[in-house]
Amino acid sequence: MTTVPVRGAAGVVTTPARRTTPLRAALAAAVRAEAAVKAFLERWSIPALRVSLGLVFLVFGALKFLPGVSPIEALVVRTWDALSFGIVTGYPAMALTAAMESVVGILLVIGVFQRFALALLAVTFVGILSPLVFFTADLFTPAPTLTAQYILKDVVLVAAALVVASRALRSAPRPR
């Protein structure tokens, strides 16, 4: 014998059926799509930023190995001369800069030794941004020269490095 539940019968609780309207369905789909995009961005945005930052440093570093190819060769030599009090100058300054930038680039692209790469990158940024202090009169006459603009755009690279560092340092082992 079978019984059929009847609305309002004793012991039978019924919930009103919720009608799905096209608007509700569209909103639900939008929420699901947004959640999927958020999950994708959380997983891949910082690794993509790390690799792209590494590629920028690898390419610009490699250019500095070739005499006369880098558009800022003279500035690099002048900066090293100022930072090292005349000890490092000429092609050794270019080669040292090229090596530092290339190592940073390779390590960031590969994703190994990120803490070392980021520490070396911080040292590199000192050299990259120091012409703004040492050669202010040459770079701003009175508006920023093309070289000054070339240096100032590196502020974006600093911000990118900070984001990459936030991920790399987040997983640092805690001392006991």
Image (cartoon, rainbow, N blue to C red):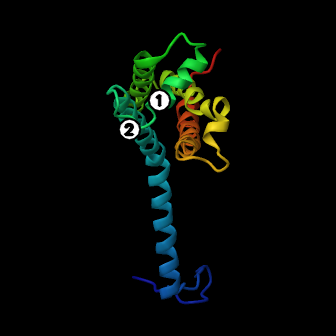
Percent of width and height locating residue 165: 56, 33
The residue under label 1 is 74
Q: Are marks 1 and 2 in contact (CB under 8 Å)?
A: no
Percent of width and height locating residue 130: 62, 29
Asked if residue 113 is positioned above or below residue 148 in the image, the reply reads: above
Which callout, 1 or 2, points to the residue nearer the camera?
1
Type of residue at label 1? Ala
In the rendered structure, find residue 55 and report the number of the disc placed on it: 2
Secondary structure of residue under mark 1: helix
Q: Callout 2 environment at 10 Å: few (<14), some (14 to 19), or many (20+)?
A: some
Q: Nearer the viewer, residue 162 or 175?
A: 162
Give the Cα separation between the discs numbered 1 and 2: 23 Å
Q: Residue at position x 52%, y 37% from top?
A: 164
Relative side of 167 to 2, left or right = right
Asked if residue 16 is positioned above or below residue 36 in the image, the reply reads: below
Percent of width and height locating residue 102: 39, 27
Q: Callout 1 environment at 10 Å: few (<14), some (14 to 19), or many (20+)?
A: few
Type of residue at label 2? Leu
Give the quarter of the figure containing the N terminus: bottom left
Relative side of 112 to 76, left or right = left
Visible residue check, residue 106 = yes
In the rendered structure, find residue 43 and report the number of the disc placed on it: none
Q: Quadrant of residue 162?
A: top right
Q: Nearer the viewer, residue 72 or 45?
A: 72
Residue that extends furthest to the top in the rendered view of this protein: 87
Give the quarter of the figure containing the C terminus: top right
N-terminal-most mark, 1 or 2:
2
Q: Residue at position x 46%, y 86% from top?
A: 4
Secondary structure of residue under mark 2: helix
